[in-house]
Image: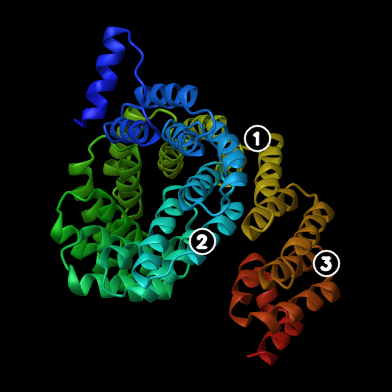
Amino acid sequence: MPQSVTIYESMLSEGRNIYFDVEELVAIVRFYIFNNKLQEAMSVCEFGITIHPLSSVLQTKKAQVLIEMQKFDEAIEILSAVSKIDTNDVEINTLFATALVRIRRGNEAVALFDKIISQMEFSGELYDLNYEIARIYMQNSEYGLACRYLEHAYAENKTNYSLIYDYGFALERINEDKKSIELLRIYLEEYPFTKLAWYNLGIVYQKLEDYDKAIEAYDFCIAIDETFASAYYNKAVILYHAEKIPAALDVFIELSELEPYSYIVTCYIADCYEDLREYKEAEKYYNMTLDINPKKADAIYGLAKILLMKAKFKASEKKLEQAIEIEGTNPLYWFALARVQNEQQKIEKADYSYQQAIKYAPFNVYCWLDYSELKFYNNEFSTAIELLNNAKSYIPDNAIIDYRLAAYHFRSGKKRTAVKYLSDALKRDYDSHIDFLNFCPSAKIDKRIKKIIESFN
């Protein structure tokens, strides 16, 4: 403990007043800041200012303590005043800029940081300062501004691997993915057993949809640390969305051993089993998910789908209503509910559910097709046609819609209009004419229809 601190604490315990010069007071404040005794540091600042009321140094130290206490507005008020007295003081401007960054005024801080940099004479100082400024921005998640200074620091020193890692990480956060890969690869050549670097590399490749390289990076990460749950999760999600369901399931099960109470993981396992048509296991894991989180709507929806496949329509409907209570804007739930209600001939309810599905997913062609079918099979031919014409305002030039319009007109006896829609659809997507023929079996023997279809073959 510095002697000045011993004397100061003795003064307090004995209730005496002792004179300290500014330099001694600054040393005491630094000691308390270093030891995270911020209230004591503030008391020293206030005591010192009563002795030296015109000292900008002590005011600056007080502002530093306020920043450490996260009282940024108070710090800025002090620093704004003292910066007018000592306009080129590096410490004042650094603290002032730091406080601005911490209250999300990072763009205003740039001018102050640049001013500080312009005062530096040696390249070593420039490197350290640019890197320090970048760290300030990174701590506040302002990665774009951080990269501005990391680029300068990297230009001064290309051998600091901490800097290379930070720069690669920050670049990924602002979607400069290719440059991020380049820097992370440089870092990993020197430190190949850094799991976070492999993990971040995997994230970048995943964003670029280079899934094989992403999985390779996550595998390295897992090889280094077999308990790194996030790497397992990202790898499993890639495999799942690539429809490599057995492989995804294996990874999710490994992950569940690390995170047995993760309802996200158990729900994914259930999804995998459902995709593999192992419905008993799927049901087991959906229920397990709901034991952990009763409000996990995806799991309720999963159970509803299994009940629907078992033709347990009432039970499925009840589950879907529960899911909608939790996520009322999810179009998948409304669409499934409409189908279940339609199966039970609850036409009015199905009508409303289809409307909700379309409201939340107006670009989903199958919502429009199913809703129009509901109308068509209930002899509301003109409404069915009107619905699909409305769909075309959201999904123009869609062959499937035109094929269905052709079918509705054909079955309504309007063959000339049916031919027009059929021709338009054949121009766009010949193969999908099967949908038209399935919906209108009698069209298969209609000479004019056969001739038009053959003309596009």
Question: Who is closer to the viewer here, 21 or 170?
Answer: 21
Quadrant showing the C terminus: bottom right
Residue 180 is left or right of residue 108, and the answer is left
Question: Who is closer to the viewer here, 450 or 145?
Answer: 145
Can you give x and y, in whole percent of width and height, for residue 357 in the image?
A: 65, 46
Residue 208: tell me if it is visible: no
- C-alpha span from label 2 to label 1: 55 Å
Residue furthest to the top in view is 15
Q: Nearer the viewer, mark 2 or mark 1?
A: 2
Q: Residue at x 71, y 77 (%)?
A: 425
Residue named by callout 3: 413
Residue named by callout 1: 346
- C-alpha span from label 1 to label 3: 28 Å
Residue 144 bears which disc, if any? Answer: 2
Residue 230 is left or right of residue 412, and the answer is left
How many C-alpha atoms fall within 10 Å of the one at disc 1: few (<14), some, or many (≥20)? few
Query: Which label's residue is closer to the chain start, 1 or 3?
Result: 1
Amino acid type of disc 1?
Lys
How many C-alpha atoms fall within 10 Å of the one at disc 2: few (<14), some, or many (≥20)? some
Amino acid type of disc 2?
Gly
- C-alpha span from label 2 to label 3: 63 Å
Q: Residue at x 41, y 75 (%)?
A: 179
- Judging from the image, what secondary structure is the residue with disc 2 in? helix
Question: Who is closer to the viewer here, 164 or 449?
Answer: 164
Residue 184 bears which disc, if any? Answer: none
Can you give x and y, in whole percent of width and height, for residue 254 in the image?
A: 19, 49
- Judging from the image, what secondary structure is the residue with disc 3 in? loop
Look at the picture and state if 216 lies above or below 332: below
How many numbered marks appear?
3
